[in-house]
């Protein structure tokens, strides 16, 4: 039973969801800024966007979803991020006043890439625009169904 943010049966303090969402947004904003400052060429492979952050309720871990346009080597990119994670975590702790600075876990978010691919496939389809079909749907007033 949760009462006043505390799970008394196991003694774990649970944060309200809206506070976690605000923390996720703050972490996303701060990391977006500091990822641009990393000078490691393994990380500077393309345009990096922080698409989402998912922080655990105890603030110990934060899963950071990144979208990279123009990524050359995923393995090198993640090894560069791993070496820069200490810097990013320190900057995160300096920017945000949290009880714990979460350990950062990075994952590649390929949803933007998939969306662009689907969009290009749809644009390449040769579908004739037939205005007669569109008009016939509007003329189909069947009053029997009412």
Image (cartoon, rainbow, N blue to C red):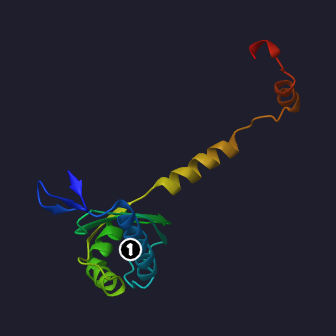
Which residue sits furthest bottom? 94
Relative height, residue 34 to residue 59 (above, below): below
Front-lying residue, 19 or 121: 19
Look at 69% across and 39% down and name the residue there: 125
Look at 16% across and 61% down and name the residue there: 12
Front-lying residue, 96 or 34: 96
What is the count of numbered marks? 1
Q: Is residue 23 left or right of residue 146?
A: left
Which residue sits furthest front? 3
**Which quarter of the figure is the C terminus placed in?**
top right
Choose top left, top right, bottom left or bottom right for residue 5: bottom left
Which residue sits furthest left? 10
Q: Where is mark 1, residue-wise?
A: 27
Front-lying residue, 5 or 45: 5
Choose top left, top right, bottom left or bottom right for residue 21: bottom left
Q: Position of residue 84 (x, y in %)?
A: 30, 79
Q: Position of residue 93 (x, y in %)?
A: 30, 83
Please, what secondary structure does the residue beneath circle 1 have?
helix
Look at 87% across and 23% down and name the residue there: 139
Q: Position of residue 115 (x, y in %)?
A: 55, 51
Look at 39% across and 83% down and name the residue there: 38
* Label 1 environment density (alpha carbons within 10 Å; few <14, some 14–19, many ≥20): many
Relative height, residue 119 to residue 109 (above, below): above
Q: Position of residue 74 (x, y in %)?
A: 37, 63
């Amino acid at each position: 039973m949760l009462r006043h943010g505390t799970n008394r049966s196991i003694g774990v303090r649970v944060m309200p969801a809206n506070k976690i969402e605000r923390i996720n947004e703050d972490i996303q904003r701060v990391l977006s800024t500091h990822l641009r400052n990393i000078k490691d060429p393994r990380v500077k492979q393309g345009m990096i966007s922080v698409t989402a952050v998912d922080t655990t309720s105890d603030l110990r871990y934060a899963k950071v979803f990144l979208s990279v346009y123009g990524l050359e080597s995923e393995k090198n990119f993640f090894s560069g991020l791993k070496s820069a994670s200490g810097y990013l975590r320190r900057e995160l702790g300096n920017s945000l006043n949290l009880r714990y600075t979460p350990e950062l876990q990075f994952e590649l978010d390929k949803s933007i890439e998939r969306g662009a691919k689907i969009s290009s496939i749809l644009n390449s389809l040769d579908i004739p625009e037939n205005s007669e079909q569109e008009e016939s749907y509007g003329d189909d007033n069947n009053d029997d169904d009412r």
